[in-house]
Amino acid sequence: MAVKMPPKGSSASGVKSKLASGETKPKSPSVAIQLYLIAYNLVSFFLWTVILATLVKHLLLGPQNSSYILHRISSFMEVFRPHRTYLIQKYSSLPAPLRSLLVKASTTHSHMGGLVAFVQTLAVLEVAHAALGWVRSPVPTTAIQVASRLWSVWAVTERFDAAATTPFYASMIFAWSFTEVVRYAFYANQLMDHVPRPLLWARYTTFYLLYPLGAGSEAACMFATLPKSLPWNDKLGQWGFREYIFLFLFTTWWPGLYIMYTHMMKQRRRAIGKGFWGDGSPIDAVKKSK
């Protein structure tokens, strides 16, 4: 769902010549689809805001009474999630403030894992949006991005206690939720033809910190499920097919992170220019990418 800037040197005469040669302008979504996409992005923005606020509150204050939304969604998701007993590491050798934070981070999944699983699973709709041509996002790219998130949720943290209780689960959800709050707010405003400059800047700048944090935490959650022994010294027979698959994914996660990171840097230069604040490109130069 990259924002594409108009190519340099484009002009009205260029557009006319293309139309004269038989090319047609891409059709805009109907009003009904446009309204649906705005509603979808606003609902997604709201749900990820709830996740971010719940996470921050949990990390600051510890387990709290569940909000109505958190309680209802968690109850609904119990049907699809395995019942588990959480064993939380005490971190007794660490200073008290750090120990307290890590324990809270380790209990994040038990407090709000159902909400995260529900909201992230809704993102499969974005693959459908791309496949139906309602947005300009390439279907393969969208599918890969959604699948990687769903893998981290359903194949890793929802399946293995070690992944659910690692503090990296909390850092992963923080990166995801902060990113999605900005992203969905950006898309909703873009569909309404008004993208405030600060939101445009945030959309193409926060990834510098959030993408390594999120992708690194995803890899760390997978790594947490692996045996403590080394594969070539597996005296207890703990390494099987699943463990080798996870180890392979863990090692390939980092080159993938680098490729995506540099790709996003190029997108940023196209969208807002160089420098920390960009080059001051006018907001109305942003083309709809959805």
Image: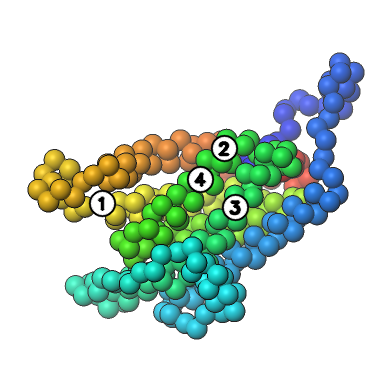
Q: Which residue is mark 1?
A: 226
Which comes before the other along the chain, label 3 or label 2? 3
Query: Residue 46: x and y, percent?
Result: 65, 66
Q: Is residue 130 above or below residue 91?
A: above
Amino acid carrying label 1: it is Leu
Q: Which residue is mark 2?
A: 141
Secondary structure type for disc 1: loop
**Is there CB contact under 8 Å for labels 1 and 2?**
no
Q: CA distance from mark 4 to mark 3?
A: 9 Å
Q: Nearer the viewer, mark 3 or mark 2?
A: 3
Q: Which residue is mark 3?
A: 123
Q: Which residue is mark 4?
A: 147
Instruction: Give the residue at x 82% y 40%.
Output: 28
Query: Residue 177: x and y, percent?
Result: 54, 60
Amino acid carrying label 2: it is Thr
Amino acid carrying label 3: it is Ala
Which comes before the other along the chain, label 2 or label 4? 2
